[in-house]
Image (spheres, coloured by chain):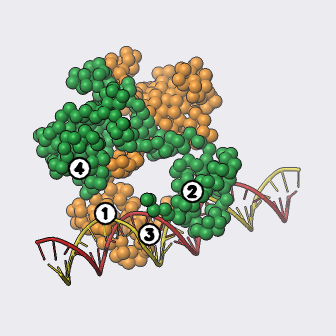
Chain colours: A green, B orange, C red, D yellow
Amino acid sequence: MARSFRYQEIAESIRGDVEKGVLATGALLPSESELSAAHDASRVTIRKALEQLRGEGLVDSRQGFGWFVGSSPIRQSLDSLETIEGQLAEAGRSSERRVLQFGFVQAPVEVEALVGAEVLEVKRLNLADGEPFAYVTVWCKASLGADLSRSDVEESTFVDLLLDRLGHATQVISAIAADAAIAVALKVDEGSPLLRVRRVTTDSAGGNALVSEHLYPARRTEFEVTLSGPTGEPAGLRLVE
Amino acid sequence: MARSFRYQEIAESIRGDVEKGVLATGALLPSESELSAAHDASRVTIRKALEQLRGEGLVDSRQGFGWFVGSSPIRQSLDSLETIEGQLAEAGRSSERRVLQFGFVQAPVEVEALVGAEVLEVKRLNLADGEPFAYVTVWCKASLGADLSRSDVEESTFVDLLLDRLGHATQVISAIAADAAIAVALKVDEGSPLLRVRRVTTDSAGGNALVSEHLYPARRTEFEVTLSGPTGEPAGLRLVE
DNA sequence: TATCAAACTTGTATCGTACAAGTTACCACA
DNA sequence: TGTGGTAACTTGTACGATACAAGTTTGATA
């Protein structure tokens, strides 16, 4: 299936050595030059393999010192967790998705500026184990929405449906109080806090394709962010239920 | 000061061409091969320069098509902004920090499990332009907190004070309703939604060092996340005021 | 007009080399 | 005996060349 590259094979080989060998954290690996000779590959390729394993938390290195077995097996599992999107899709697949509204409408002002005046508006309630989990509104650019049916959006996520036509996304996480209609749908008290995620997804050409708003009951939902260093970039972002 | 590399010089040169040239978004750049010949550098170096400019949002590319002037000048400034931590530190430096409580106390149960029974507890109100901006509680492991004075934490952030002794961090973003005491401090109505960030920061050895809770008025604060692809990892996470 | 192939483009894997910068071990000298 | 300098390692990174995969455009041909 997936083409196998030299550096991936080497990464697997090293992973095997590390896992079956003494797995004492801190144990030193052979130097890049030695690995290079042993696997008959250039140092560049060896590094690529090692950095992949570093990404998984299996090994780490210090300049001038060497590569050693990683110290924190907890981070390892944390980092390999899926992102929000993956988890949302997963939750969506394994649970009920109830479409509350489906049709072309005049876009709200703040949406019109992004994807045009006429949009496909879909309001959807996601349930997990029978309990309402998220209240989602998607405004989809008319040209993209033209091919979609109500049962399409009931069965799959927008991301799945349009995967190859979408680019990157920007999310804004905020909190609001539940209004009456949403409180009923999500089975929470009116005025209780909700996590709100507003997302703008671009199409492959760079224009805006989707605007969506996701509302989660705060009592049942949290976002978890892992930062690689005290001042570093987030290494992963996931939805915690 | 900063050593100048070939690819950085080339990036500057291309940036100049793009900015003074026709800045119509979508305008095509010379191909990598042509740039390679023009600057007498290998394609690898040209690519590195172009990818740096892509990181700034100035240019973008499509496989088989070419490099063109970036389409979204807004994203440009967005992406170059600092991460949450940087912004928090920035906000802290340029504004008032009022210490409400400082002392060693018995840790709350959920904190005790992470950093031990006795902790340095600091409650702090951050203000920007005289307005309360965040209500922060930090529980610091006793061994680390022993060296800190009240004026230390009033003048600097914990991250600044302990920078070289801290490792990575995990954040959880959630929403809660304001209780009476916090509503007064943040000048919001009791029961109004707050964004809550709970963070566990490890020390360099991998153990837990700090537990903190940051509360932001939801009406004034949001978190923004940029995703590199529809199902990709978050490329950046920042605090939007 | 519709289709297919050729000639572009970027994307990525691989080889090589050179040098900067951090770490360790050892040897000479006070 | 201790101390300092240096040599010999290590990783980190810049740069070069090449090969091929894969997407896009263009033009020739049926």
The span from disc 4 to disc 2 (Cα, nearest Å) is 40 Å
Q: Give residue B173's quadrant in the image.
A: top left
Name the front one of labels 1 and 3: 1
| Residue B169 x, y percent position in the rendering | 51, 38
Tell whether C7 sits left or right of D1: left
Q: Give residue B119's quadrant in the image.
A: top right
| Residue B20 x, y percent position in the rendering | 26, 65
The span from disc 2 to disc 1 (Cα, nearest Å) is 32 Å
Name the front one of labels 4 and 2: 2
Name the residue tied to disc 1. Answer: B62
SS class of the residue under badge 1?
strand
Which residue appears at 55% of the width and 53% of the height?
A53
Question: Label 3 neighbourhood size at 10 Å, few (<14), some (14-19), many (20+)?
Answer: few
The span from disc 1 to disc 4 (Cα, nearest Å) is 17 Å
The chain containing the residue under callout 2 comes to A
Which residue appears at 35% of the width and 59% of the height?
B54
Name the residue tied to disc 4. Answer: A208
Q: Quadrant of the C terminus of chain B?
A: top left
Name the front one of labels 3 and 2: 2
| Residue A92 x, y percent position in the rendering | 33, 38
The amino acid type of the residue labelled 2 equals Glu
